[in-house]
Structure formats: structure tokens, C-alpha cells
Amino acid sequence: MGRQPCCDKLGVKKGPWTAEEDKKLINFILTNGQCCWRAVPKLAGLRRCGKSCRLRWTNYLRPDLKRGLLTEAEEQLVIDLHGRLGNRWSKIAARLPGRTDNEIKNHWNTHIKKKLLKRGIDPVTHEPLQKEARPEESSSSHADILPESSNNNVTQENDGIVINSDDNSRSPAENSSSPEDSILLDSICNDELLLNSLWMDEPPLVDASWNSIIPPAAANINDDMGFPSWEENHTRLSDCQDFGVHDFGFDCFDSMEFISAHNNTLEMEHKQY
DNA sequence: AACGAACCCAACCGCCGCAGA
DNA sequence: ATCTGCGGCGGTTGGGTTCGT
């Protein structure tokens, strides 16, 4: 019989969001928090489906989002985590504060895949590309590439996660990231507890800690962007990764200061079109 | 300058898992 | 035990931008 569409198709707007819609959504969420997304469009006065609102918020409007290209360290971390978790973009994104699964997925498909191929590494299995029977490149589906436990450095978890124990040992020369980036990467990659928690599929880390990290009174609003600077928050975000997402309540973030600053930012961004 | 190719990324689509009835 | 609705996830697409000729 099929499921009902998530929203009434009639009268529901699609396509790019306007500044006006963004404002409505931001204002609504900042005043009411993230409640049931299905109800959001109606309550916020938007002609969008709830799913679209959620996506817009999580991928674009969330104030903790870090814009711009991924740093070398972040990229390396993504590669490492992908080697262990596969295409679980949301889980990977949870390890990179300020990055969304969509962003990482896009970056993977457009940049990292190519980089790995250039290095002679299969982006799917994270193994060195073999001269043998892999015609053209290795972008085929997961299923036909996963090794059958024949590799000494790759084991397979019961849920299909591919683990590389040492395949990710790239030459340091390739990683020209800053010392701080390296420290960040190392601290995450070498953290056995953290990695174990990944295997357990337990989400110890956070994708939403920003809302309490930026207390309204203490929020350091940048004049140009309207958001606290990433550099400043990053340490705090990293620190806060020791807490679960549920340790932070959304409702504590309710800054009219932020709303107006954010609105200004949005206007500026939309004017660029 | 004009055109096509390649690239990038925001947004959509459809499926899945979970919770509640 | 089954059904239904919702949120979330990963894959895909389409339009805009940049690059190369």
C-alpha cells in the first residue's frame, strides 16, 4: 500500500530556501527548540515539509556549523573513520564538530575519493589498489569488493564494518596539516576508548552540543558572521565530546542577539545570489 | 568571448528502525 | 503481534559555478 508521504504534496514548496524562510525557521527553532519536525512548518508558517525543515536546519542553519573546506586533519580523520565505519556519514560527522553528514558525504565523493585513488588506495576497502582483476577503477558497489577475511590487516565486524588495523598508516609527508590539527587527529585516532565506542555503535559524541556551549550571555558573537568563532568553540566542542548529546538541552539556547545577528548574516548571504 | 566539460553542493527521495497505539 | 507515523540516514540529482579550450 505504501506509506503516506511525509507531507502533503499539495502546497508544499520545494527547491532552494529563501532568506525569508530561513528567518522563519531560525526564529521558530531558537524560540521553541527542536520539537516534532512534522509540526514545525505549520507552526513556523512555512510551506515546507518537516523533513525539508530538519534538513535545512541541520545542514545549513545550525549556528555551530563550520563552513569551508575540510582541513587536512579533518580529511584524514574522515578517511580513517570511513575505513572503520564505512559510509556511515552521520557517525563520521558526529566526530567532527561543526560538520554535517551531508557535507562530509559530499566532500568524500568529490575530493577524498579522488585523492585516495591517486594514492593508489581503494576508497571503498581502503586497501592498496591491486594490479589484478579490478578493471578501471574501484568505484563499484560495496558488496563485490569487501574482502573475505583473506586480508591480514582487515577484519570484518559482524555488522559489516570494515576495520583497517594499519592500512591507514599514510606517510606523514602526505599530511601537511598544522601541528594542532595533527594533535587533534592523533588524539582522536589513538583514543582506544573512543574507537571502541564506535564499534559498539554507541553514540557517545555529539552533534548538537553547540546549543549549550554558547550560552546566550556569554555568546561571543562575531561582528561579521554572527557566530562565535570556530577556533574558539572548537576546543570547547572537543572537550564537550566527552558528554552525550542528551547532556545538552536545546532549550537553553535562546538568544535574541543571535537571532538578529544570524538574520543579518542570512541577508548578506542571500544578497550574494 | 563563447562554449562545453567538470566540479561542487544544497536539496530531494526513498528506505529503515524505532516507538507508540 | 501488527500497524502506523515519525525521525534519521544514505544515495542521488539538478542547478549553479568554475575551469579549460
Image (tube, coloured by chain):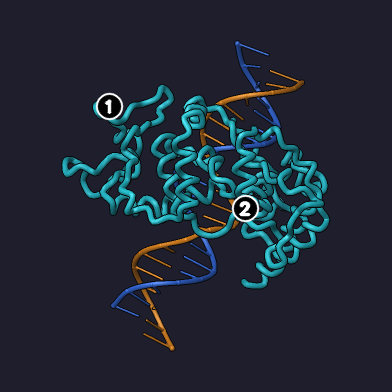
Chain colours: A cyan, B orange, C blue
**Foreground residue, A179 or B13?**
A179
Residue type at tag 1: Glu
Residue farthest toward the left in the current orientation of the protein: A132
Asked whether, in this view, residue C15 is left or right of residue A213, the answer is: left
Mark 2 and mark 1 lie on one chain; the one further toward the N terminus is 2
Q: Is residue A146 above or below residue A214?
A: above
Q: CA distance from mark 2 to mark 1?
A: 39 Å
* Res. A37 image quadrant: top right
Residue type at tag 2: Leu
Q: Is residue C5 above or below residue B20?
A: below
Asked whether, in this view, residue A272 is left or right of residue C9, the answer is: right
Label 2 vs label 1, nearer the camera:
2
Image coordinates of residue B4 in percent, x first then y, are 35, 72
Q: Label 1: state its secondary structure.
A: loop
Callout 2: chain: A
Q: Label 2: state its secondary structure.
A: loop
**Foreground residue, C21 or A155?**
A155
Residues packed near mark 1 inside 10 Å, few (<14), some (14 to 19) or many (20 plus): few
Provide the residue designation for mark 1: A148
Image coordinates of residue A130 in percent, x first then y, are 20, 42
Asked whether, in this view, residue A86 is left or right of residue A38, the answer is: left
